[in-house]
Image (tube, rainbow, N blue to C red):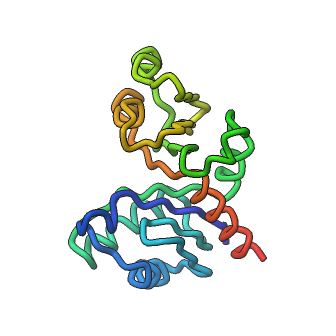
């Protein structure tokens, strides 16, 4: 069985698309997953599965739709994809700013990202870099008011699921637990 990191976008936000982690765990176990561990209510999961990542993503979305009436965006990474994203972080000095450092995991490699427009939107103290299918953003003043953060998915042209450094570290810790 492979160890996967599952990032589910847009659940339990603002009272919409409510999916308690206990129910999500049950859905995943019904799909044959084991060692399911979740972190906070925003769709961060580490698990073991015999399914391929793409199949697990599709089956999870469909199962949630059947059970809860909405189909969330589900991104599934292999554990080594998470480790590689951490190792390639171009802003290691920003790790001391866990809420300001963000990893945007893209569904696919962007074919025509508008990096010039992204550059024009960034605040003076913001930095970003696209490495493969991960969009790294250091926004020391937070992403809530960042024009860059608000427009990056559209300008990259690929669906993205974003997590801050604190969450990335917790997910990595869960993956270590599942692996032991």
Judging depth in this view, the residue of 18 and 62 nearest the camera is: 18
Q: Position of residue 91 (x, y in %)?
A: 68, 35
The quadrant of the picture occupied by the C terminus is bottom right
Choose top left, top right, bottom left or bottom right for residue 53.
bottom right
Q: Position of residue 23 (x, y in %)?
A: 39, 83
State left or right for residue 5 relative to residue 106: right
Identify which residue is drawn at 65% across, 52% down: 82
Considering only vertical position in the picture, is 68 above or below 43?
A: below
Q: Position of residue 135 (x, y in %)?
A: 53, 36
State left or right for residue 178 relative to residue 118: right
Choose top left, top right, bottom left or bottom right for residue 173.
bottom right
Judging depth in this view, the residue of 35 and 86 nearest the camera is: 86
Considering only vertical position in the picture, is 98 above or below 52?
A: above
Judging depth in this view, the residue of 42 and 159 nearest the camera is: 42
Number of callouts in the render?
Answer: 0
Identify which residue is drawn at 53% across, 69% down: 45
Considering only vertical position in the picture, is 7 above or below 92?
A: below
Q: Position of residue 109 (x, y in %)?
A: 51, 33
The quadrant of the picture occupied by the N terminus is bottom right
């Amino acid at each position: 069985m492979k160890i996967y990191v599952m990032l589910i976008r847009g659940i339990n936000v603002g009272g919409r698309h409510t999916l308690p982690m206990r129910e999500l765990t049950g859905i995943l176990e019904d799909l044959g997953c084991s060692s399911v561990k979740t972190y906070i209510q925003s769709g961060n999961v580490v698990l073991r599965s015999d399914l391929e990542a793409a199949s697990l993503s599709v089956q999870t979305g469909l199962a949630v739709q059947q059970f809860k009436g909405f189909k969330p965006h589900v991104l599934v990474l292999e554990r080594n994809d998470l480790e590689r994203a951490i190792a390639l972080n171009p802003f290691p000095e920003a790790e001391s700013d866990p809420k300001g450092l963000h990893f945007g995991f893209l569904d696919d490699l962007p074919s025509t990202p508008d990096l010039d427009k992204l550059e024009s939107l960034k605040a003076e103290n913001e930095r970003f870099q696209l490495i493969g299918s991960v969009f790294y953003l250091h926004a020391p003043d937070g992403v809530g008011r960042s024009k860059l953060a608000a427009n990056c998915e559209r300008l990259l042209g690929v669906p993205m699921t974003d997590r801050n450094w604190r969450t990335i570290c917790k997910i990595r810790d869960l993956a270590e637990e599942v692996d032991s």
